[in-house]
Image (tube, rainbow, N blue to C red):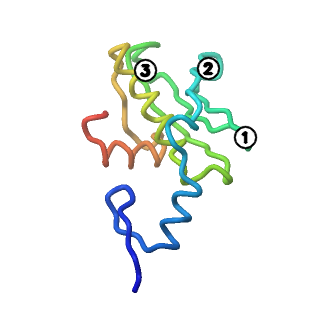
Amino acid sequence: MMRFWLFGGLAVAGKVHRLLIQHAMTPMQMPTPIHDEKRLCFALSFPEGEAVLEYAFAEGGGEGTAVIFTHTHVPEALRGRGAAAVLVRAGLEWAAAREMRVLRGPETCSYVRRYLEMHPAAG
């Protein structure tokens, strides 16, 4: 008899569940995102490398009125653990706190675009 567990709202088989649990990070294991204003990015530092969310201020709007998130990079060893989502949430919270518009266009990072589609209230 195959056993199933709920993981993030999905029913998964025993072996898959063990793999997901083994590689998932709890909030306590996830470092706090650092806003690096000189590099125009948010970063998470891990022993395996650095995950980043890069952004740019929109042209013509002036610094501080509109932002576009241009690139997310997560080292291969860290993928699938939620680091990109943590970075995007930090970037969106930062923009909201400064009442900046988050622009979506061809320059928008594909991960950010998917995140905003899955979490429409976030953008």
The residue at the point 34 percent across, 42 percent down is 116
Going from N to C along the chain, the mark reached first, 3 or 2, is: 2
Amino acid type of the residue that numbered disc 2 sits on in the rendered structure: Asp
* Mark 1–mark 3 distance (CA, rounded to whole Å): 23 Å
In the image, residue 48 above or below residue 88:
below
Q: Secondary structure at mark 1?
A: strand
Q: Secondary structure at mark 3?
A: helix
The residue at the point 62 percent across, 45 percent down is 74
Amino acid type of the residue that numbered disc 1 sits on in the rendered structure: Gly
* Mark 3–mark 2 distance (CA, rounded to whole Å): 12 Å
Going from N to C along the chain, the mark reached first, 2 or 1, is: 2
Amino acid type of the residue that numbered disc 3 sits on in the rendered structure: Trp
Q: Which mark is residue 94?
A: 3
| Circle 2 or circle 1, nearest the eye | 1
Q: Quadrant of residue 19?
A: bottom right
CA neighbours of label 3 inside 10 A, class few (<14), some (14 to 19), many (20+)? some
Q: Residue 42: where, in percent of width, then height?
A: 56, 27
Q: Which residue is mark 2?
A: 36
The residue at the point 35 percent across, 62 percent down is 6
Left or right for 43, reference 61: right
Quadrant for the C terminus, please: top left
